[in-house]
Amino acid sequence: MRAMAWDGCSGEVAGRTEKGLEVEGLETVIGMGWKRIWKGLFGGKAEETGLVEMVEHFQELLDDHQSLMELMADLGEKSGGEYVFDRKYIEDSMGRMRGLLLRLAENLNLIGRNRYVGLYAVVDRILLQLEGDLRGRVALSEDMPLVVPLSESPTDHPELTGGKAEALACILQRLRFPVPDGFVVTTRAYRRFIEHNRLEARIHGWLESWNRGDMELPQVSRQIRFSILAGIVPSDVAALIKRYGEKKPSWAVRSSACGEDGQISFAGLHETVLDVSPRDLIGAYRRVLASLFSVEALSYRRDMGLLGEEAAMAVLFQEMVPARVSGVLQTLDPVEPHEDRMVFHYVAGPGRTIMEGKSRVQSRALRRSSLLDWEKAEEPLGRDSRGGREEAEWGTDDLLPPEVLNELGKWGLALERFFKQPQEIEWALDLSGRSWILQSRPLVLQGGAAEMRHDVSQLASRHPVLVKDRGTVVHAGVGAGVVFHVRKEEDLQRFPDGGVLVSPHASPWLAAVVRKASAILTEKGSSAGHLATIAREFRVPTLFGVEEACSRLRAGEVITVDTKQRVVYGGRVEELLIFELARDGSFEQSPEFRLLRRLLKRIAPLHLADPQSPDFSPQGCRTVHDVLRFAHEKAVEELMEVPRSLRHSRRLRLWELATNIPIGLRVLDLGGGIDPPSRGDKLELDRVTSLPLKSFLEGLCGRGLWSTAPAEVDMKGMMSSLTKTAAASPGLEEMAGFNLALVTKDYLNLHLRLGYHINLIDARILPGTERNHVYFRFVGGVTDITRRSRRAQLLAEILSRHDFRVEVRGDLVIARTGDRPEGEMKTILSMLGCLVAFTRQLDIELRSDDRVEDFVRHFMEIQGRSNNAAKV
Amino acid sequence: MAGQKLKVMVLDDEPIVCKRLQPSLEKLGFAVTTFTRSLEALEDIEKNQYDIVITDLKMKDIDGIRFLEEVKKRYPRSEVIVITGFATLDTAKESFKKGVFDFIAKPFKLSEIQEVVLKAAAKITGEA
C-alpha cells in the first residue's frame, strides 16, 4: 500500500501512475508531451528523451514564470514614481502578460498531462477582469459593492466611493488613525437609484434644455432635485443602509462625489446632513444625492467643463462624534505656505458652528519641523513687511491641551506624507478627550502663494550633501526626519513617528514600521521585494542599494531624503519639502497611477500560500501571482514524481556521487552537467560540471566548517542520521535514501529525502542575472510539529537574511530568490548546501524558541567563516 | 536670477508627462511651460522663444516632426528633444535624425530626461 507519497502531501500523485495506465481513453486528451515522457519512462532509449522533454517544458514554464515575475516587478517598479509612463505602456504590458499567462497554463498541462485544464478558465477570468479595469468599467461591475464599511472600503476606486470616502479609508486602513466608524453607499448604488426611478433620460433632458438656453439654471436644478427627493431607494440598497445604520444612534451623512476632494475641489458644493437618527437615514441619503444637482454644483461643473460627463455620487455615513472641541488643521499656512507653520482653527462644541460663525473661532499655529508652539518658539513674528500676520493672531488658550495639538500635528504631517499634498483636516476632540479625524482633503494653495522664496535648484550650495547618486529608486518622493538604524526586529518597537528608516537589508519584517517612516534607505535589497511593495503602498520615499548608508548616516541626526534626485541632505531642507507639497503635487493621484495600482491589485497579491491547503487549486487562484504560484508549484510536484519512476529504471544512466558524506546522491545528466568517467558508475566531485550542483556540493561537503559545531549537533551524529531510513513510517521505505539530481550545465533540480524530511531545490545559474533563480522547498521532520515548525522558522530566518522571499506554513518552507549575478548565485547555492547539512536533524535540538536564534547566529558565523575561507 | 533661467517647453498630449516633467525640471533651475495641445504650442512659439523644447512624437493635429521643423525654422539655436514610444524609437531615429538633440523612449526615468536636458543646456550655455 502506498498511503503516503514522497512529498508527504500528494497521495493522489502516488496512485496516478496506475490510473494513467488503466484509462486508455484519456490518451486523447492527454498532451502529447506527457505521452512522450510516459513512453520515455518505460520505453528504453526513449526514456531519456521523454525526460528531457519534460524538463524542457519545465524550463520553458520556469522561463515564463520568470518573465511574468519580472513583468510584475516592472509594473510594481513603475508604480514607484521614478518612471514617466502613459496609458499605452499599461496596455502593452497587459498584452504581454496575457500571452505569457496562456503559455504558462499550457506548459503546466503538458507537464501534468492535462490535469490542470481548469486553470485555463481561471486565467480567462483574471484576464477579463484586467480588461474591465483597463476600460474603466469598474464601478459598474457587478462584483463591486453597493454598500461597504469604511474599514473595508477599497482605496483605489475613487469612481466607486468618491474622493472623501477614499481618503478616509486610506487614513483608517493604511495610516490607522482614528476615524469615526462608518460606511459608504457607493456610486453603484447611485446608478441603481437612477435606473430604478428611470431618471437618467429625464435628467439628461433637463440639462440639455439648460444648455440650449430653454430653461434657467435654478429651474433645472429644482426639477432634478425634486425628482431625486421623490425617488424610491431600491430595496436592497435601503436594506443595507438600515442594517449598517442601526449600529449607531446618530450619523453624519456626507457627499463623497467622484473628484470631490481629489484633483478637483467640490468642497462645500454638496450637502452634509448632521445628527441623523437611524430611521431618517434614507431621507438624508436622498438629500445628499439631490445636492449633486444644486445650483452651485451644476454651475461649478459647467465651469469646469464636466457637464458632459456623467455625474455620480457616493454617500458617506459616519458616526457622529460628540465634540468638546472641533476644528480644522491646515498643514501649511495657506497665507504664507513657505513658512514652517501649520495652522489650527477651532471652536468649542460641534464643528458646524465654525461654518455658521456662531461661536468664536480660535487659532493656533505649530512649527512643522518641531511641532513646537509657534508662539513660544524663538523666531519673532509680526515684523514681516510683506504682509505677514501680526504676532497676537496666534492664541495660546487652554481649550486644546498641548498633547492634543501635538498629536493632531503629528497626524497632519503623516497625512501629508501619505497624500503628498498639504492637507486640510477636519478633526474633533470628543467628550472623553480622544481625538478623531473626520475628513481630510488637499489644501488648495492660491496661485501666487505657492511661489517659492528659494531656488530649489541651488540646494547643494546651502545644505550639506551626505549621499548622492547612490541606490535605486523604489518610491519617488521627498521626506525628512531623524535617522533611525534598524538591525534587528526588537529595534522596530522604538521606531519614531516620521523617522528615516536606515537598515543594511531590505528585509520583509521591516514592513511593520513603513507606515511611520518618512523615508527608507537600505544598503541592499530588491526593488521587487516585499518591502518595496509595502513602501509603495504607503508612498514612502525609498532608496535601496545605498552603499554605506548605515555608516554615513548617523543615528539621531536629522536628514532630508530626495529619492527623485537620489540625494540625502543633512538637516531639514524646508524649501525642498514645501516645493514638493506645493509644486510637485502627487503623482500617486494621477489616473495612470491609479489604473496601474488597480491592475496591480489583481496581479500582485498572493493568496495561495500553502500548497497543502484545499484552496490550492485553479479555482483558488484570484490573482496573476496566484496563477504563477500554482503553476510553478504543481510543475515542481510533477517533477518530484520523476525519481520514483526512475528508481527502478535499469536503462537510464544514473551516476552515484562519490563524496565524503554518505548522502547517496544519484545524478542524471540531461546535458553538460557532468564530465562522465570512462569506467564504473561512480562520479567524483570534480567531474560535476553543473554550476549549481557544483556550488551546492561545495557547501554541503565543505571541510573544516563543522569543527565548531555545537556539541548537540556533532558531525558524527549528524552524518550518521543523513542516511537514516524512514522505515518507521509505512510507505516511505521505497524512497528513503534515494536522492536525485537532474542536471544540465547551468541547471539543477535536486530531490533530497534525508531522514524524515523532503527537500527540493531548483536552480539555474547563467552568466547574466535575469534568468537566474533558486527555489527551495522543505517539509517534514522527525519530531512533533512544534519543533518541526521551529526548524522551519530557523530556515526562514536564515534564508531571509540571504534575501530570499520566504513563506512558512507549519513545517513547510518555500523560499525563492533570483535576479542575481552569477557570483552571488554560486554563493547562495553553496550556502544552501551548508544549510541542508546544518539543519539536518536540528528539529530534535530545537527545544525552545530561543534556540532558534542561537542556531541562526551559529549558522551565520559558519557562513561568515566559510565565505572568508573562500576569499582566501 | 529668474532672467538667467533657461526656458523649457514641454509638449505632450498626455497630461501626465507634462505634470511629471514640469516640477522635475524646475528643480534643476529651468523655467518650464507645458502644453498638451500642439496647436496652442505652435501659437505660443510665434511669440515666445524657448531654449529647449521637449516634444512627443505622436500627437493630434501636428506631430513631433512638424513641430521640430517649426521650432528650428524660427529659432535654429533651440534644442529639441523628442519623446517617443519604445517600439518606434529606431524608426523615429532613422526618419529624422536631423536637428534633433536626442530621443527618449517611453517609459523613461525622470533622471534620464533630466540628464539629456542638462546636456542640451550645457551645449546652449557653452555656445553663448
Image (cartoon, rainbow, N blue to C red):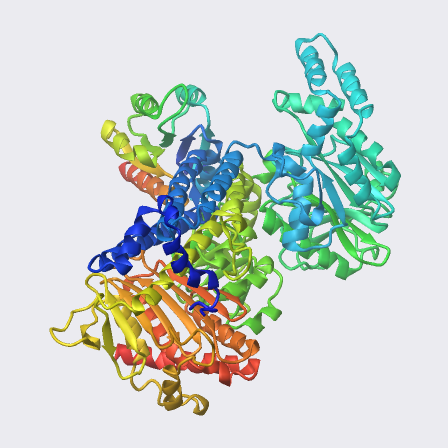
Image quadrant holding the N terminus of chain A, namely bottom left
Q: Is residue A461 above or below residue A333?
A: below
Report the number of numbered marks.
0
In percent of width and height, residue B123 lies at 28, 39
From the viewer's side, name the closer residue of A31 and A460: A31
Which residue does the image show at 35% across and 67% down from the upper left?
A644
Rendered image quadrant of residue A755: bottom left
Q: Return the residue nearer the eye: B81 or A82.
A: A82
The residue lying at 76 percent from left, 52 percent from top is A436
Residue B27 as seen in the image, left or right of residue A380: left
Please indicate, yes or no, whether residue A773 appears anywhere in the rendered image.
yes
Give above or below for A624 relative to A405. Answer: above
Residue sitting at x 51%, y 40%: A125
In the image, residue A2 lies at what x, y percent? 44, 69
Res A219 → quadrant: top right
Outermost residue on the left side: it is: A678
With respect to residue A175, does B38 lie above or below? above
Q: In the visual, does A608 lie left or right of A546?
A: right
| For residue A147, side relative to residue A828 (left or right) | right
Q: Which quadrant would the C terminus of chain A be assigned to in this image?
A: bottom left
Outermost top residue: A214
In the rendering, at what x and y percent does residue A269 appear? 74, 30
Q: Is residue A413 visible?
A: no
Q: Residue A35, image x and y in percent?
A: 31, 51
